[in-house]
Amino acid sequence: MTNDEITQALERPSQRTADDVPIVTVTHDVETTHGRLRIREHIGRGAWVRAPRRAVLLLPGPVAVGSFFRIPVAGYDDATVLSEMGCVALTVDLLGTGDSERLVDGRACTAARNAAALREAVAKLCAMRGYPPVYVLGESWGAAIGTQLASDPTLVRSCVIVSTLFRDPTPAIDQMARAPEWRGILDGLPDGYLPVGEEIWGPLVQPMPEAVATWAMKTQPGTYAAAPMIAVLDLPYFDPSGAKVPGLVIRGAEDPLVSEADARDLAETYGGPAEAVHLPGAHHIPRVEASGREAFWATVRRFLEAV
């Protein structure tokens, strides 16, 4: 879809969000030397007429796909929020998930390989559209990948790091994701892909509003590359010290999976200027929780406007 075609589509919008905001979605299958990535642009009128245009790259966690940022429930579609902030939303299915390339072995879908593929893909998309360096917002595994992209200021302007385990696991993480029997399950996967269902998603949706939780349970469970789960067995699995752009670490104050001390350590180790913010009442995914969503986006908005 060309820039002129997007302009025309926004003048006669046929796609509207649950909040009745016109959004044009353009789908790209971007070939890179590290694998094919499915990237979608979600473009609102306010973002498209802005000069220069701004884009936010949204990177999901280890058991979610790009659609997790486009929840069709009023008040929970992040393309709507970003459009109101004058930003285009870019959603991604990471390697081995969703509509992106399924590598032969899911263990090969590492953070480093995803970051390398994204560098190529985002550079191509920015060159095509004329976007300046993108803002990155990642959750968990996606945020770890985002810190690697943040080493290139010609590609990335800033990095928001949400609910990301660094090197000090909580007891809940040790029990859930680092137990010896879990390592045995991961080692025994014949192709490096893990079926993810209610046993993992059930606890995650508990703090979400009912309509959001219902949608998430219908759309996000599936088969995922095991690389993120394997990475957590040996911490830290990423090094944020090479970042060269401003960073913001966000953690829900009630998150049982990421400790306050670990989030602070991540902010202090991050290579660019960074701070850690703890959202009262929020759990592991504040963006989709009734107790955390408003504070989450207010915090992100202040940060993006400052950088």
Image (cartoon, rainbow, N blue to C red):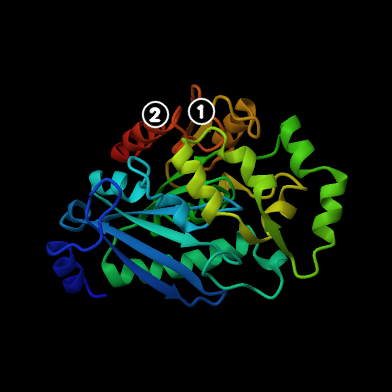
Q: Is residue 273 visible?
A: no
Q: Earlier in the sequence, mark 1 or mark 2?
A: 1
Q: In this view, does 22 lie above or below 201?
A: below
Q: Which of 113 and 269 is in front in this view?
A: 113
Q: Nearer the viewer, residue 52 or 215?
A: 215
- Picture coordinates of residue 73 (x, y %)? 37, 45
- Residue at the (18%, 67%) spot, across then down: 9
| Residue kind at label 1, given as amino acid type | Ala
Q: In this view, does 136 lie to the left or right of 148?
A: left
Q: Is residue 272 above or below residue 93?
A: above
Q: Is residue 227 above or below residue 291?
A: below
Q: In which quarter of the image is the N terminus?
A: bottom left
- Picture coordinates of residue 192 (x, y %)? 74, 65
Report the residue that reaches farthest toward the top: 280
Q: Is residue 245 above or below residue 33?
A: above
Q: Tell me the quarter of the picture where residue 19 sits.
A: top left
The numbered dot on residue 201 is: none
- Picture coordinates of residue 236 (x, y %)? 70, 45
Q: Is residue 282 visible?
A: yes
Q: In this view, does 14 lie to the left or right of 121?
A: left
Q: Which of 203 and 157 is in front in this view?
A: 203
Q: Is residue 111 left or right of residue 153?
A: right
Q: In which quarter of the image is the C terminus?
A: top left
The numbered dot on residue 295 is: 2
Give the Cα distance between marks 1 and 2. Answer: 9 Å
Q: Callout 1 environment at 10 Å: few (<14), some (14 to 19), or many (20+)?
A: many
Q: Callout 2 environment at 10 Å: few (<14), some (14 to 19), or many (20+)?
A: some
Judged from the image, the secondary structure of the residue bearing numbered disc 1 is loop
The numbered dot on residue 282 is: 1
| Residue kind at label 2, given as amino acid type | Ala
- Residue at the (51%, 42%) spot, across then down: 213
Q: Do the residues labelled 1 and 2 touch (CB within 8 Å)?
A: yes
